[in-house]
Amino acid sequence: MTEQPVFVLGGHLQALEPAAFETEAEFQELLARHPRVLDFGSLADGQPLRLVLVAREMGVPTSGESGPAYWLDHLFVDADGVPTLVEVKRASDTRIRREVVGQMLDYAANGARYWPGALLQRSFEGTCAADGRSLEEAYGELLLGDRSAEEFWSMVEERLAAGQMRLLFVADRIPLELRAIVEFLNRQMRQAAVYAVELTQYRGDGDLRVKDPSVIVAFEPIGPFEDLPNASPASRRDLRPQRAPANRRTKAELEEENSALRAEVESLRRQVAGEPSLE
């Protein structure tokens, strides 16, 4: 079916026609400069979600002694300290059907293990410097309150270690194959929230453009991302001001679950890639 234009009514009626992104770099630059197109949902305290860019082309090591082996398109974070990993592909790139999923699972599993808070802080502050943005303005978007920057990034590190993160697959067209895999991941993963986001671009006369983001497949754990155990009040926002749930896990239990998560992610990656199981 032919995709219909959208219309803008100003001095006259103007039709904006669907237009593909010319390059993946153009697509990536859009998200880096305007992350609000990915803002959906809310923070734990009910405020609107606002993603803040940590780094574009974030390096992902596969061991504590090595440098980056992979490069994630974008890493964002929100004021609750929840990291958001984003991979971008154009519909014309055949990797969007399956290969991108294996890439994302590699990034999530290794980022959870090898992204310490200090590295994330340096990456974020380096991005701010490169963009000519003051740290005061950037940290203002993260609503630090009484927390120091070091305490905030320590919380992000703990979120990663607990497997609490968002995984976003962003494309100008989400193919059926990717939808099916994201739905499968949603049924399997316990702590992570997985999204497939379709971002359609429309162009009119001159430089007029319209971006229309749609969440095609989404999953969010019931309620907000849960509070972190064994964290001092100064190191995080009060994500759950009510009485702490009786089933709050200890730090040792979270570490055990993280090990299980890494094994689960590796198993899922192998299933997606069609590789034999290690068992």
Image: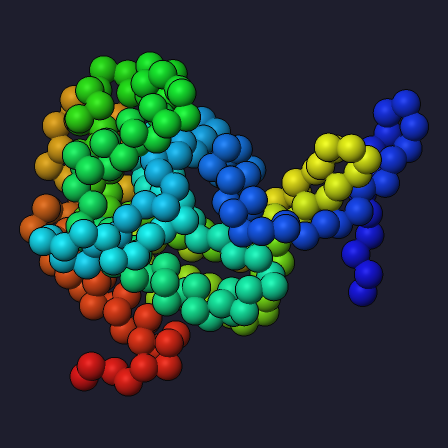
**Residue 29 drawn at (x, y percent):** 51, 40
The image shows residue 248, relative to residue 42, as above or below, that is below
Q: Quadrant of the N terminus?
A: bottom right
Tell me which residue sits at (55%, 64%) in the image. Answer: 93
Q: Is residue 278 left or right of residue 196?
A: left
Quarter assignment of residue 8: top right
Q: Residue at x 25, y 82 (%)?
A: 277
26 or 73: nearer the viewer? 26
Image coordinates of residue 150 in percent, x first then y, are 17, 26
Q: Residue furthest right?
A: 12
Residue 104, percent across and down? 37, 59
Instruction: Please give the count of numbered marks on the rendered protein.
Output: 0
- Picture layout, residue 28 above or below residue 261: above
Residue for point 37% across, 76% down: 273
Report which quarter residue 69 is drawn in.
bottom left
In the rendered view of the protein, which quadrant contains the C terminus? bottom left
User: Foreground: 146 or 72?
Assistant: 72
- The answer to whether residue 243 is above or below residue 133 is below
Q: Position of residue 134 (x, y in %)?
A: 36, 16
Residue 131 vertical placement versus 77 (above, below):
above
In-image side of 223 versus 247 (left or right): right
Whether residue 180 is visible: yes
205 sits left or right of 210 in the view: right
